[in-house]
């Protein structure tokens, strides 16, 4: 059964959680600049280009084979009858071809389920944009890839130069059967369950040790308030109610925003914060402004669900290796520096927690009965209104590192990389960020009923960036003056006798200009250091 590729428990969960209201595919949308004087059909060029690269990523050529009676997770099998005209499509925007029209089209395309009888991906070339640019939208089922695997998928299709790199053609292979026998599928499923039980048994000692350490730390935090906060909140809490925390429909709204990466890095470094801290702060500040405008800002902090990659360096497997945690966004704090201090404390705790569980978190479990169990629980959660009451998080925020240099597709230059992710029952807003070519590219997707004006949230992100640029930064410490070489080599002399004190001359009427740090900046810098030390 070695030729069958079994879905892990995480991969399978994305299949079983899927419903018409909750599609489980991820995607991205890009703007491309065609080469000067280009006269061909870019759609046909892209189709030929992708066809020549399909063997580089198995997601292009494999489909699902279901277990009999859905007893366990499906398996991936090769598909030798791929209809490229179905998977790659051509669309034209109506005039005038604005970005708002493009975002509306993307939101509609993203709300449609993928056909599970085929390989789970679709690409769209979209023309008709103002300025002559062309757009490219693609989506792949989350059962096949996570964020990092999506980056590696892009690396198989995109190039670093306008001239596509030479790729060795695939080796000829034998034709596979269209369907597998029932006995063969059941035997493969049973063998996979036994392997998963053995792997889980090897991880149990490490899991028990990490669980004991986490429980002990949680009990200590519950008994001992945080420094300087006699009423530190418990981590065992529900997120506050917001417009984002409801059961969702199958309608989506989408918008995209680009912000300068280098400026974000510079300000974050001055404040002792990472890029990820600043991304969370930008999202928190935008959410605070958005909810405050409609008088829906909770008194308690919004909570973000943050996915964490468990993928080891160099692992190019096309599957999901991801966990998740929750972080308070500090939206109840009006002071932006205190908000950042709370976020930094949260990310520091997250890193400590992941250090405790690193290497022992299993990415797979035995999946016997999981299709029924997971799909049943998902349906219950969405239809029983539990999503309105049982709030684990208010928003999903994910930050995926991208490439710092321009990439090309069939000779055209990519101008930006906007992720298009997933919203689920109870968390109707997802903000995913990917860095690309000196930009932080934010993709905001939401249930249209919960967030009909997602473009306003995009404008709030821009205002948050403007606020970030006005933050008072700590004054840089003056470096000691260099010692002249001659003075450094001069022999030490006996100290001269101190001269007699003279009367101080009168102060001049006009003093020379001096560098002055505003009192506000000094105070803010001091407050930032104290808050970060106390929270971390």
Image: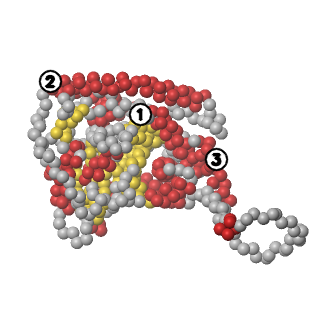
Q: Quick check: 262 above or below 199?
A: below
Q: Secondary structure at mark 3?
A: helix
Q: CA distance from mark 1 to mark 2?
A: 36 Å
* Residue 238 position in % (x across, y down): 49, 34
Question: Any mark on residue 183, and which?
Answer: 2
* Quadrant of the image occupied by residue 35: bottom left
| Badge 1: residue crowd in 10 Å (few <14, some 14–19, many ≥20) | few
Q: How is the image coloured?
A: secondary structure
* Residue 292 position in % (x across, y down): 51, 50
- For the image, the number of numbered tags is 3
Mark 1 vs 2: CB contact within 8 A: no
Residue located beneath label 3 in the image:
530
**Front in this rendered view, residue 253 or 260:** 260
**Front in this rendered view, residue 222 or 451:** 222
| Residue at screen point 47% across, 49% down | 276
Left/right of residue 58 with respect to residue 451 in the rendered view: left
Locate the C terminus and report the quarter of the image it occupies: top right
Question: Any mark on residue 24, and which?
Answer: none
* Quadrant of the image occupied by residue 159: bottom left
Q: CA distance from mark 3 to mark 1?
A: 34 Å
| Residue at screen point 17% across, 66% down | 40
Question: Which residue ends up furthest to the front in the rendered image?
Answer: 491
* N-term mark: 3 or 1: 1
* Quadrant of the image occupied by residue 306: top left
Q: Quick check: 39 above or below 72?
A: below
Locate the N terminus and report the quarter of the image it occupies: top left
Q: Secondary structure at mark 1?
A: loop
Residue located beneath label 1 in the image:
359
């Amino acid at each position: 059964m070695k030729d069958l590729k079994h879905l892990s428990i995480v991969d399978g969960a994305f299949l079983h959680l899927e419903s018409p209201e909750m599609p489980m595919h991820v995607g991205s949308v890009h703007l491309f600049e065609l080469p000067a004087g280009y006269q061909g059909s870019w759609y046909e060029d892209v189709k030929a280009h992708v066809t020549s690269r399909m063997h580089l990523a198995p997601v292009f050529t494999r489909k699902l084979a279901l277990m009999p009676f859905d007893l366990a997770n499906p398996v991936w099998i090769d598909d030798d009858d791929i209809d490229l005209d179905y998977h790659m499509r051509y669309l034209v925007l109506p005039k005038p071809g604005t970005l708002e029209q493009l975002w509306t089209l993307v939101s509609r395309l993203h709300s449609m389920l993928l056909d599970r009888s085929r390989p789970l991906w679709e690409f769209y070339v979209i023309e008709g944009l103002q300025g002559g640019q062309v757009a490219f939208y693609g989506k792949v089922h989350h059962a096949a890839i996570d964020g990092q695997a999506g980056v590696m998928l892009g690396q198989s299709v995109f190039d670093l130069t306008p001239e596509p790199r030479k790729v060795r053609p695939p080796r000829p292979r034998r034709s596979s059967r269209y369907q597998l026998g029932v006995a063969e599928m059941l035997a493969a499923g049973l063998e996979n369950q036994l392997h998963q039980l053995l792997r889980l048994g090897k991880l149990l000692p490490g899991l028990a040790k990490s669980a004991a350490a986490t429980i002990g730390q949680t009990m200590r935090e519950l008994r001992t308030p945080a420094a300087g906060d006699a009423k530190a909140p418990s981590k065992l809490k529900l997120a506050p109610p917001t417009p984002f925390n409801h059961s969702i429909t199958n309608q989506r709204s989408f918008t995209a925003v680009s912000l300068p990466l280098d400026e974000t890095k510079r300000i974050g470094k001055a404040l002792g914060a990472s890029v990820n801290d600043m991304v969370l702060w930008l999202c928190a500040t935008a959410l605070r402004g958005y909810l405050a405008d409609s008088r829906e800002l909770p008194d308690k902090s919004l909570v973000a669900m943050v996915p964490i990659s468990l993928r080891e360096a160099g692992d190019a497997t096309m599957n999901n290796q991801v966990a998740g945690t929750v972080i308070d966004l500090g939206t109840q704090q009006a002071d932006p520096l205190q908000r950042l201090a709370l976020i930094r404390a949260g990310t520091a705790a997250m890193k400590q927690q992941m250090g405790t569980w690193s290497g022992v978190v299993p990415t797979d479990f035995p999946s016997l009965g999981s299709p029924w169990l997971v799909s049943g629980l998902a349906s219950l959660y969405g239809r029983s209104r539990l999503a309105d009451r049982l709030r684990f998080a208010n928003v999903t925020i994910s930050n995926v590192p991208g490439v710092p240099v321009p990439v090309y597709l069939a000779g055209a230059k990519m101008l930006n990389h906007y992720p298009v992710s997933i919203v689920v029952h109870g968390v109707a807003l997802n903000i995913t960020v990917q860095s690309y070519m000196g930009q932080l590219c934010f993709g905001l997707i939401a249930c249209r009923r919960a967030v009909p004006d997602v473009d306003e949230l995009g404008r709030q992100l821009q205002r948050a960036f403007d606020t970030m640029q006005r933050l008072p930064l700590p004054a840089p410490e003056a470096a000691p003056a260099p010692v002249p070489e001659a003075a450094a080599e001069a022999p030490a002399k006996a100290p001269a006798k101190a001269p007699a004190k003279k009367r101080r001359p009168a102060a001049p009427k006009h003093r020379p200009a001096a560098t002055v740090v505003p009192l506000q900046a000094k105070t803010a810098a001091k407050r930032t250091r104290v808050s970060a030390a106390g929270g971390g």
